Amino acid sequence: MTSAPGNAVAERYDLRVPRYTSYPTAPHFSDAVDEATYRDWLGSLDAGQELSLYFHIPFCDSMCWFCACYTKIVQRYEPIHDYLGVLHREIDLVADALPARLCARHLHWGGGSPTLLTPEDWLSLIGALRRRFDVADDAEIAIELDPRDTTAEYVAALATAGVNRVSIGVQDFDSDVQAAINRIQPFEVVERVRSWLRRHGIDRVNLDLMYGLPRQTTAHVLDMVDKAVSLDPARLALFGYAHVPWMKSHQRMIDEAELPDASARLEQLLAASERLQQHGYHAIGLDHFARPDDELSLALEQGRLHRNFQGYTTDEARVLLGFGASAIGQLPQGYAQNLSPLRDYRRHVEEGRLPIARGFRLSPDDRLRAEVIERLMCDLGVDLKVVCDRYDRSVAELTSSIDALASLVDDGVVHVDDGHISISERGRPFVRLVAAAFDTYLATGQKRHSRAV
Ligand SMILES: C[S@@+](CC[C@H](N)C(=O)[O-])C[C@H]1O[C@@H](n2cnc3c(N)ncnc32)[C@H](O)[C@@H]1O
């Protein structure tokens, strides 16, 4: 080892690599997976298969300049109401294509801002879903909340619908940083939502925080962490701001001169991470923190942590069905993504077609590499022999990937010993780079990604 991982490494590895919420990642999906493929995949699911369901609500009432999610700004409710009608119809189309009435264990509403739905529409959507799917009594029912749109009435509706986990979008509490990202949201707004959730017994609360934002300093980030912890969340996500203006043109509103550089980002990440651990949270994978008694911490300890399109999860159902424009599903055969343009999504559903735009059919080699990458992203280590045995392959077939780790080994990011790969604690921020060594599509894909740290 020539040096401990630190700022020099951050600058040297100022590479752009995926976050690996899937392997292969979404930019490699193609139209080789279409409606017929998806219908076939749905029809071949086991009648006892447990499901995760994801619903995408692609609307917000104002644009946050940092946002990398698929959303559309609306000032009227009508487009949202119309969209919900289409979503109801899509639920029927998908349920009709399944071999039996299946049971969901995890439900997740993301966006955009699901909080823009009226409580009545929200309850009617849950009703439509329950008409076509069973929902396990102990199912995790989760939703992303924009605290600026959330009312006491809305939280009451969530409780009535059985919601038991919420993620509150915070980003940063500092007003100057908030001005630079067009998201004015005083601490008191989040605190108020937290108290409504407590009153209604929704105690599984995640907060989404970010570092690497314009005007953010390490002092801001530490203050943000302390304020976030005072709200007593079970989990926190600490996302590095992904600046991808070539994909998200509104990010051009952010002054690049105000963005922290690679070493400042790393300093922010390390400072926040240390402070969170001082507050008693466990570090989970790339960007999550959880209380020791939270299911995410327990899953990590027991080797049951997973990663899917929503990030880190305890979800063990290996089938995820995505509903709504741009939503991505994962089935035993591969991935399928819905059409993103709202008009196209709507037209397909109204014509009675499953609105699939593209996807990816997994080869045996993809499955092996997907598992290696998932273990690295979750456990910061993997025993290649154990994984290769499961796929009837030999570790020798991964030699070029192992060799690609050489400079990360020299830098003390990762240790390789007889097929055991382990990322050092100080190498944690670079886990995406270790995973990327096993990605055979990265070099050929010529896709641009956000910074690795
Ligand atoms: C899918 S968004 C929806 C949250 C909700 N609309 C809100 O604003 O509160 C979920 C989270 O993704 C994170 N996020 C969005 N854009 C990002 C970016 N460019 N880089 C890193 N994280 C991002 C933010 O922390 C955000 O809270």
Image: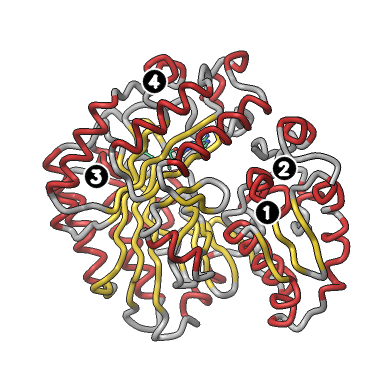
Colouring scheme applied when the structure was drawn: secondary structure
Which element carries disc 2, helix, strand or loop? loop
Q: Note whether 47 is above or below 148 in the view shown.
A: below
Real-space Cα separation, disc 3 to disc 2, in angstroms: 35 Å
Q: Which residue is mark 2?
A: 447
Separation (CA) of disc 4 from disc 3 = 34 Å
Residue named by callout 3: 81
Q: Nearer the viewer, mark 4 or mark 3?
A: 4
**Which residue is tagged 1?**
28
Q: Earlier in the sequence, mark 1 or mark 3?
A: 1
| Left or right: where 55 falls relative to 400 | left
Assess whether mark 2 and mark 1 are in contact (beta carbons under 8 angstroms): yes
Q: Is mark 2 within 8 Å of ligand 1?
A: no
All told, the count of numbered labels is 4
In this view, the residue farthest toward the bottom is: 47
The answer to whether residue 217 is left or right of residue 195 is: right
Q: What's the amino acid at mark 3?
A: His
Pointer 1 local density, CA inside 10 Å: few below 14, some 14–19, many at least 20 = some
Q: What amino acid type is highlighted by mark number 4?
A: Asp
Chain-order first, disc 4 or disc 2: 4
In the displayed structure, 11 sits above or below 279; it is above
Which mark's residue is nearer the viewer, 1 or 3? Answer: 1
For the point 61% across and 17% down, the residue is 256
**Residue that numbered label 4 is attached to:** 174
**What residue is at 61 percent from the left and 62 percent from the top?**
374
- Of residues 350 and 44, the one nearer the viewer is 44
Q: Secondary structure at mark 1?
A: helix
Q: Quadrant of ligand 1?
A: top left
**Mark earlier in primary sequence (3, 2):** 3
**From mark 1 to mark 2, how far is it between C-alphas?**
9 Å
